[in-house]
Image (cartoon, rainbow, N blue to C red):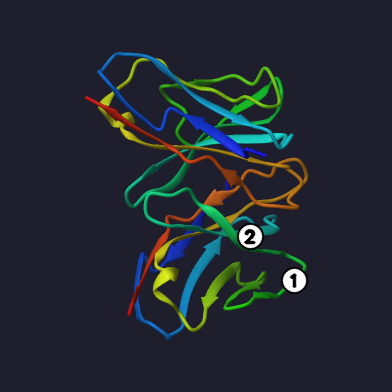
Amino acid sequence: NAGVTQTPKFQVLKTGQSMTLQCAQDMNHEYMSWYRQDPGMGLRLIHYSVGAGITDQGEVPNGYNVSRSTTEDFPLRLLSAAPSQTSVYFCASSTGTGASGYTFGSGTRLTVV
Amino acid sequence: GENVEQHPSTLSVQEGDSAVIKCTYSDSASNYFPWYKQELGKRPQLIIDIRSNVGEKKDQRIAVTLNKTAKHFSLHITETQPEDSAVYFCAASKGGGSYIPTFGRGTSLIVHP
């Protein structure tokens, strides 16, 4: 079991560029989420999915898109990168039953210049 | 939606002392309360959780208590060790197909040798 795999680990973008952060899990978890972590702000929910084909917005969705075509994959797309999107991004998954908490990926540190 | 407040933001203790981190939540329907530990540069990892039908849960030096009436829950770490130094996050969520946790802003615990 690889758990939750995120790529890349580090990325530098120029303002206006677009990119996709990849997230894959091999635990057959229904729930997957994307969080961003900024100093003093905790973990803020960007988008989440409760199953293949179902996505919804979280607390800070602007500037980001997601899709969930399979149970395993949940990519996060930055449409036109802005310096305010400089952050550490975590993908996480869970069974969705409340029987266990989230399993987090190792994170992507994104810098937008 | 749910709002989770976490205090203190920073906690400094001597090795061997106890540490207590407190969280309050706003949604009385929340019924699952996990705690995560995030070491520097690492991903958050679940360390303990409690459900609303339980008042206290222990796991070695870690315990969590829940007061549903007051809508607050706490993490207790006894006999702290330097390796307990990390950021701790509380979270709250409700089941019934809506298991998306809301996180507190985190507590940076520093254990001095």
Q: Chain of mark 2?
A: B
Share a chain, discs 2 and 1?
yes
Residue A16 appears at what percent x and percent y?
A: 29, 14
Of residues B17 and B82, the one drawn nearer to the viewer in this rendering: B82
Side (left or right) of B54 relative to B8? right
- Give the crowd class for mark 1: few <14, some 14-19, many >=20 residues within 10 Å: few
SS at mark 1 in the image: loop
- Image quadrant in which the C terminus of chain A is located: top left
Side (left or right) of A16 relative to A37? left
The disc placed on residue B54 is 1
Residue A96 to residue B46: above or below? above
SS at mark 2 in the image: strand
The disc placed on residue B33 is 2
- Image quadrant in which the N terminus of chain A is located: top right
Residue A102 to residue A91: above or below? below
Q: Amino acid at mark 1?
A: Val
Question: Measuring 59% from the left and 25% from the top, which residue is drawn there?
Answer: A74
Q: Residue furthest front?
A: A1
